[in-house]
Amino acid sequence: MIPRDSDFRPPNAPFVLHSLSVAGSSAENSSSEIPLTVNYVPSKFSGPRRRKTTKIRVMGFPRGGGVKAFSSGQTRIPNSADDDVDGLDVSKWFRKGAARRWNVFKTVLFLSNVAFFISTLAALLFCLLTWFDVFQDADVIRVGNRTELVFSTLAAAFGLLTSLIGLNGVLLNNRGFLALYTFFLWITFAFLVIPGYITYKKREFNLEGKLNSQWSRNLGTSGRLRIQNKLGCCGWFSPFVEATISQSCYARSILPGCKLSYMNWQRRILKRWYTIIFALVPAQIGAILAGLLCSNHVTYRFGKGMIPKRYQLNPTAMKVIIDNYTNQIAEQYGTDVASNVIAKSGVLSLANQEGAPLLSANTLPFGSLRESKGN
């Protein structure tokens, strides 16, 4: 049996045939103006059973989001004064009598973000002051602990950027920013533990051998001179062993070797370094947990708590829905009954709004239905 061509045709989407001609223009132009709500209208309308709270009024859609939007019979269409509508109007933040209540999730997220911001800002300032040689022994850190200082500066800078993204997300109720903030917290955590691991491993595993290798191979002449000037020593064991000649370090200098003082200094600095970093790890994990648990609950609703603009009803969509509703009634009871039902229901007054041609019970589009019956 040879299949017919009609068997391979894709199914038609609901309410896109003759009903799109109601808008008063071609199907292509009107389909771009019709919101996606019409695709979710049931194919068969309900019977005489109605809710008390679903009365149709001319401009009577309940507006505004929030918890009330989820109650029975509420239509989630944004109000002009709603702070969650698309687009940000800063002037609305300071209007008189506006009740600004933060829920528990938003408060926890804000406090964790503020603590994270303060810690990263303090760490970045300390790193920058070290790079600028403000502290007394900062030059020794720049020479002998350059790798740890680079990773610490990178972690602090990236953490500060992450905290600013999170702060904007909290204040603007922007879940896109908060999702990016939560993801960047994991990257900041990785940047944070790297210098902690390096400093801990360097101090606890053969520090003496690492410093011997560093002094003889990695520091060079200028690096040894900078350490000698800061620590007040000369040479590694004595002025005759791997020393850089200067005004205070020469063959007959009475300055001691740098090994003991430099090793004690490294033990003290490295221990403070990884202790501070590992102390920040629980706070970082707490910020990650707060971001994961609270980012989607900066308000008590997920998303904006209202129908998106693409799905909101407008006069064109109402005409499409009324056309289909009328055709369904006409198929069962005839065109006269359908005209009387539509006239008594009051939906025409809701559809006949600004910017669209008027409809009446006598001008409803039954032409396509009659043509289909005639065929």
Image (spheres, grey):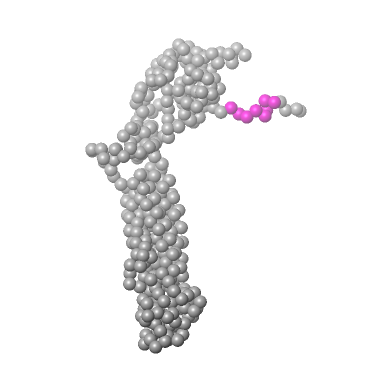
Counting from the top left corner in percent of width and height, residue 33 is at 47, 26
In this picture, is 126 found above or below 95? below
Q: Quadrant of residue 13?
A: top right
Residue at the outermost left position: 96
In this picture, is 235 found above or below 98? below
* 9 or 34, nearer to the observer: 34
Q: Is residue 336 magenta?
A: no
Query: Residue placed at 34% from the left, 30% from the top?
Result: 62
Counting from the top left corner in percent of width and height, residue 31 is at 51, 25
Query: Residue placed at 45% from the left, 23% from the top?
Result: 316
In this picture, is 178 found above or below 42? below
Residue at the outermost front position: 247
* 335 or 313, nearer to the observer: 313
In the image, the segment drawn in magenta is 5-12
Residue 196 visible here = no
In this picture, is 274 found above or below 249? above
Residue 362 visible here = yes
**Total residue callouts:** 0
Q: Which quadrant is the N terminus positioned in?
A: top right
Counting from the top left corner in percent of width and height, residue 238 is at 42, 86
Query: Residue placed at 31% from the left, 34% from the top?
Result: 81
Counting from the top left corner in percent of width and height, residue 79 is at 34, 33
Q: Quadrant of residue 345?
A: top left
Query: Residue placed at 62% from the left, 14% from the top?
Result: 375
